[in-house]
Image (tube, rainbow, N blue to C red):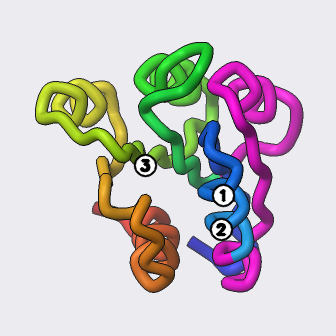
Amino acid sequence: MSAAGRILVVDDERGIRSLCGDVLRRAGHHVELAETGRAGVAAAAAGAPFDLVFCDINLPDIDGIEVLSQLLARRPAPTVILITAYPSVETAVRGMKLGARDYDYRLLEFERADLERLAREAGDPE
């Protein structure tokens, strides 16, 4: 992903949204933040397409799997990385089968280098 990549962070935890936004902005990305699944879907529909979306699984309105499904139906579809503090094999498999690029529970431990690496790798072909 280029340094000017557009990234959306969807998470109901303000601290997670803020930290992800700060790290990714310092890495040169344009970042938008959403605190609910519906707000994330609306942000994706409202403007230029996002290159990458970090989306929490557990959201207060619709879950991250539904957000993933709606985002991947858009054209062009963004790369989506699901994040969670409550990992489960079932959710990981569901998300990956639907088209999530990655499923990462460690991201919530805020390893700055990991966040920047995931953003870089999301733009690389598989």
Viewer-side label of 2, 1: 1
Amino acid type of disc 1? Answer: Gly
Mark 1 sits on what residue? Answer: 15
**Quarter of the image that includes the C terminus:** bottom left
From the top left corner, tell me how far across and down residue 9 is, in percent.
64, 49
Viewer-side label of 2, 3: 2
Callout 2: helix, strand or loop?
helix
Bounds of the magenta segment: 23-50
Query: How crowded is the residue under tag 1: few (<14 C-alpha within 10 Å), some, or many (20+)?
Result: few
- Vertical comparison of 5 with 99: above or below: below
Cβ–Cβ below 8 Å for labels 1 and 3? no
Q: How many marks?
A: 3
Mark 3 sits on what residue? Answer: 81
From the top left corner, tell me how far across and down residue 121 is, in percent.
41, 71
Query: How crowded is the residue under tag 3: few (<14 C-alpha within 10 Å), some, or many (20+)?
Result: many
Q: Residue at x 25, y 36 (%)?
A: 96
Q: Residue at x 40, y 67 (%)?
A: 109
Task: Indicate which disc residue 37 carries.
Answer: none
Q: CA distance from mark 2 to mark 1?
A: 6 Å
Q: CA distance from mark 1 to mark 3?
A: 18 Å
Mark 2 sits on what residue? Answer: 19
Amino acid type of disc 2? Answer: Leu
User: Does the magenta portion include 99?
Assistant: no
Amino acid type of disc 3? Answer: Ile
